[in-house]
Amino acid sequence: MSLTRQDVEKVALLARLKFNEDGLDKMTDHMVQIIQYVDKLSELDTEDVQPMAHALDIYNALAEDEPRPSLSREDALKNAPKRDEECFRVPAVLGE
């Protein structure tokens, strides 16, 4: 697979990243190297390798949930810079 400067510009636009000309050239070189490495991995013989979802055979390593006392609403909101009745006030991020 070949990667062009235009491909990197499109990915940067989608990721909301801005690069100067030098940065765009460097990023293109880095991404080409990454793709070449991934292509190199496809040369490995994986015939006898069993597919797995995780690299380690660890199952259910999380502790059981146990209810514990928590902060009261008043204590939780005590140091909030802005609050509205029983809620934290934060700047809108999705619009009105």
Image: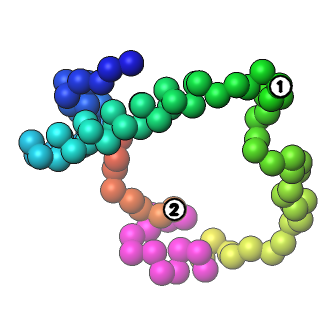
Q: Is residue 92 left or right of residue 6?
A: right
Residue of label 2? 87
Q: Residues within 10 Å of mark 1 (few under 14, many from 20)?
A: few
Q: Is residue 75 left or right of residue 36?
A: right
Q: Earlier in the sequence, mark 2 or mark 1?
A: 1
Q: Is residue 72 left or right of residue 80?
A: right
Residue depicted at x 47% and y 64%: 88
Instruction: Read off the magenta span.
Output: 75-86
Please state which of residues 50 and 82 is positioned toward the viewer in this rendering. Answer: 50
31 magenta-colored: no
User: At label 2, which amino acid type do we have?
Assistant: Cys
Give residue 67's quadrant in the image: bottom right
Farthest residue toward the left?
21
Dot 2: element: strand
Q: Position of residue 42 (x, y in %)?
A: 58, 24
Dot 1: element: loop
Residue depicted at x 37% and y 37%: 33
Please state which of residues 90 and 6 is positioned toward the viewer in this rendering. Answer: 6
Residue of label 1? 48
Q: Residues within 10 Å of mark 2 (few under 14, many from 20)?
A: few
Q: Position of residue 34 (x, y in %)?
A: 41, 37
Please state which of residues 64 and 58 is positioned toward the viewer in this rendering. Answer: 58
Residue depicted at x 73% and y 25%: 46
